[in-house]
Image (cartoon, rainbow, N blue to C red):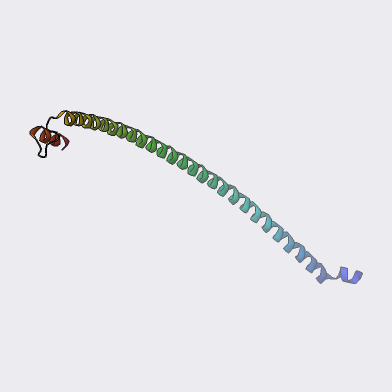
Amino acid sequence: MIALIANKWLGYLIAGGVAVGLVLLAANAVYNRGYDAAAGKFTAEIATIKAAAVEARDKEASRQEAANNAAKAREAARIAEIEAENQTLEQKIEELQREASQDPDAGRAAIGASSVQRINKIR
């Protein structure tokens, strides 16, 4: 047994194994440092991209809200216009119905001049 340990070739083999192990250990350490550096770099890039996406989303939501509010304001103004027009038309209809009920020729088979004037007001 001592002869095997004292053997010169066995010593070279052990020394070579230790040297290969040290080289692999050094390569692993370099790889890990490079991986950690790249992971840190890309983590920072991803955080920047996410922040930009959140900012863009918030800007878009703000833009949509402003556009919706403007559309609602236009809609309210148009509704007010339509209601005013409707009120005017209703008043005109009431006036024409009152005139028609007061017309002495309302029961005649033919249309008189005042009836023609009322019909022309509708157009």
**Residue 21 point in image, percent of width and height:** 74, 62
Seen in the picture, residue 21 relative to 69 is either above or below; the reply is below
Q: Position of residue 18 (x, y in %)?
A: 77, 62
Report x, y in % for residue 65: 42, 37
Residue 73 is left or right of residue 48, and the answer is left
What residue do we see at 85% from left, 71% from top? 7
Q: Nearer the viewer, residue 92 or 38?
A: 92
Image-based side of 64 in relation to 8, left or right: left
Task: Give the residue at x 50% y 42%.
Answer: 54
How many numbered discs sit on the rendered protein?
Answer: 0
Residue nearest the observer in this picture, 59 or 123: 123
* The quadrant where residue 104 appears: top left
Foreground residue among 25 and 15: 25
The quadrant in which residue 89 appears is top left
Residue 123 picture quarter? top left
Q: Is residue 58 left or right of residue 33?
A: left
Q: Quarter of the image for the N terminus: give it.
A: bottom right
Image location (x, y in percent) of residue 122: 17, 36
Query: Residue at the spot x=39%, y=38% of the render?
Result: 68
Vertical side of 29 occupied by 114: above or below = above
Q: Residue furthest right?
A: 1
Is 101 placed left or right of 5 in the picture? left
- View extreme (left): residue: 113
